Image (cartoon, coloured by chain):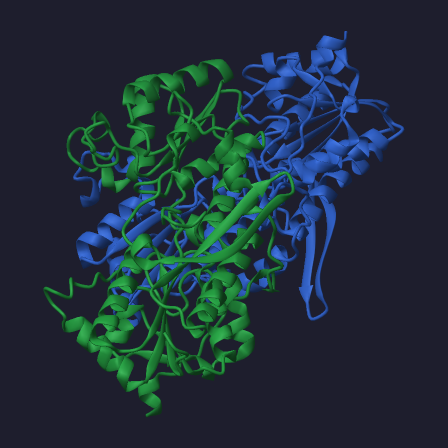
Chain colours: A blue, B green
Amino acid sequence: MENLKGACIIGQSGGPTAVINASAQGVIQTALASPQITRVLGAAHGIKGVLADQLYDMGQEDPGQLELLQFTPSSALGSCRYKLADPDVDDTDYKRILEIFQKYDVRYFFYNGGNDSMDTCNKISKYMQRVGYPCNIIGVPKTIDNDLSGTDHCPGYASAAKYIATSCMELYQDARVYDTGTVVIVEIMGRHAGWLAGAAGLATWAGSGPDLIYLPEVDFSMEAFLADVKRVYEDTGNCLVAVSEGIHYGDGTFVSEAKTSATDGFGHAQLGGLAALLAESVKRALGVKVRGIELSLLQRCGSHLASLTDVREAYLAGKAAVEAATAGLTDQMVALDCTRDASGYRCQTKLIPLTQAANTERKVPLDWITPEGNGIRQPFIDYALPLIQGELQRPLAHGLPQFAHLKKVRTTDMD
Amino acid sequence: MENLKGACIIGQSGGPTAVINASAQGVIQTALASPQITRVLGAAHGIKGVLADQLYDMGQEDPGQLELLQFTPSSALGSCRYKLADPDVDDTDYKRILEIFQKYDVRYFFYNGGNDSMDTCNKISKYMQRVGYPCNIIGVPKTIDNDLSGTDHCPGYASAAKYIATSCMELYQDARVYDTGTVVIVEIMGRHAGWLAGAAGLATWAGSGPDLIYLPEVDFSMEAFLADVKRVYEDTGNCLVAVSEGIHYGDGTFVSEAKTSATDGFGHAQLGGLAALLAESVKRALGVKVRGIELSLLQRCGSHLASLTDVREAYLAGKAAVEAATAGLTDQMVALDCTRDASGYRCQTKLIPLTQAANTERKVPLDWITPEGNGIRQPFIDYALPLIQGELQRPLAHGLPQFAHLKKVRTTDMD
């Protein structure tokens, strides 16, 4: 496609991360500096903001505040979970998007998100090609789940991994101070892939982490789990367990949703979540002191523990998206291409077709998991450890974080 | 009391904190350097280690590892929750302690803990005086709860406060990314005093924190709580709430233990804890999306977010204890004496009688809480903000914390 000139839109979508705003910063700053991009628009709550004509003029923002985006967790522009219909069935949304693109002469569209967001991006891209509206569309990957395919890893994963590993190291210290013994069960995000729970293994590798780790890649057995905990507890006097929220039985039922004895069949398991449910099961089976801890949202917004490597790569992914689009490329997602060898870790961006990235899930290879299904093996460490390197020099005020405050000047207010 | 010469014992007791090991480091390093102290012994699991003759020779430790104690959360020597009997009723433990003191010629005893630990320390001190065994005994304060009286604040509180405030700032960013609205309820430690939950107000003060904060100093009303949440949610589209685990109804019943409609009277509230229970109540009453988050152990072991001020004061408290004891003082607790004025914050140590410190609880003044009982006022900020200042330059290996590894050479193994 030829070199286009016009406005661009950047949207954020899906669950936020500690570094998704670093990608937004990469897109916005690069776009603002591009001679081909006449106006940089931020979509409020992703594609919903495009549909609702809720767009912010990013050129009106204070450059100092844009610079703070890399230190600000969550989605500064707002996010959404909105799935576009199949355009062959219902093209209402697509027509509206085209209308907005035409209204602002949008020739570049950048969408920052995970699997579903790449699906959105892909559908819009294919529609614009079909109706012959020239617009270069590039996806910018983001997900703490790390389950996007076609990329070595996803911006957002490493910072969550660093948060999880560090927190587990601290919990390991805390959970063994008494001579009376405790079982602590830490619930970690990851509905279908165990990349995040596996990151708890970095703590174990560092000498202060979970004794047992359960990933959704392996079918869960309550019997084997209780036997594992009993063995470790009897051997060492304590037991620290990391579990992925997505662990499930052989029939596919999530453990968190199964009606176990811990809920007495009243189906109230969701009141406390998986960690509380497993804690109750251990308490009943082994009669020991046990505590369930859910890392919950903390693990995805813990920007104070962000990996510098992650922040840099997230920014680069945003920058690369704009550079690719203004060079005439479209219908692609930025991916990370990494090598790990004796000379260290290197990462550069590449492009893969949006179709390849959308709607596929990448899981932890089974041979990276112990044969017993209760821990991770060295290849996982070799993969994940380089990603969590480096600490951010965060700007602080009065000992507390400083986050970006965007003015969010609406384009409609300016007309 | 005259200048004594002999061995010393340092013990840690009660729930661990991010900086209790900094106090231990202050005691151990100062004691090792003291010409009056012939041998520095660490008690395994506090007073239980004394009773069991499980003592470590701290002189055998690598000085580099002792230096790492200030960065290591939890109780490196092990902790206990052991309440000594009234010596007039049963003096078995006291006779055993005297026996151990005599065995190792212990002339200095330092006990590092909270209310109950100061009670232990006080009882031992009084017993040794009564039987005429010369031994200088000094308590070193520690508790994230900040409820020890006679001291401006307690080492350990500030680091937990900084963790809570920072985490709430991040959660505030995360919990408002969608245009669909969410209520997030954060459960914070503090069974009887609201110092920790109040620290969430530092996040609000910094512009990114809870809309509502409930402390145990004020009787809780579920009706008023639900009305507060409804109002904030309707006004702003979201609501972030911080609650102390110790909130209770007018009749003294803890909300976490009450059989509310959220538990259907089956009494399973403990499965998920207070945050899950309140989340369920909000969901039922308002029909909105809600999430409960329990900071759990994370808030007391989060040494990666420790306050430099706290670490320094914790170390100083340990050092001051040894200096006081070797100068001939006994039967005292180290306290912090602080001033906050236009010229800044200053802190020095002082001594108060152990009897004064033991078994009394200091609560948040009622006029530091809003009249509605759902937030904190400026005096709380003025009090707490200076305490969370400064960041630790933590030693890291491969992007993860480095904790002290003590050899723990047993004295009995050396005999």
Which residue shows up at 69% across the image and 20% down it? A408
Horizontal and vertical percent position of residue A290: 27, 54
Q: Quadrant of residue B219?
A: top left
Evaluate whether residue B171 shows in this view. Answer: no
- Considering every residue shown, the one lying at the far left of the view is B89
Q: Quadrant of residue A142?
A: top right
The residue nearer to you, when weighing B216 against A189, is B216
Tell me the quarter of the image containing the N terminus of chain B. Answer: bottom left
In the displayed structure image, the side of residue A101 where residue B388 appears, left or right: left
Tell me the quarter of the image containing the C terminus of chain B. Answer: bottom left
Which residue shows up at 87% across the image and 28% down it? A2
Which residue shows up at 61% across the image and 50% down it? B390
In the displayed structure image, the side of residue A171 where residue A161 appears, left or right: right
Q: Quadrant of residue A3?
A: top right
Evaluate whether residue A182 shows in this view. Answer: yes
Vertical order, B362 against B123 (above or below) = above
Vertical order, B225 against A379 (above or below) = above
Count every numbered label the image shows and give the total. 0
The residue nearer to you, when weighing B137 against A341, is B137
- Considering every residue shown, the one lying at the far top of the view is A415
- Considering every residue shown, the one lying at the far bottom of the view is B415
Horizontal and vertical percent position of residue A299: 50, 45
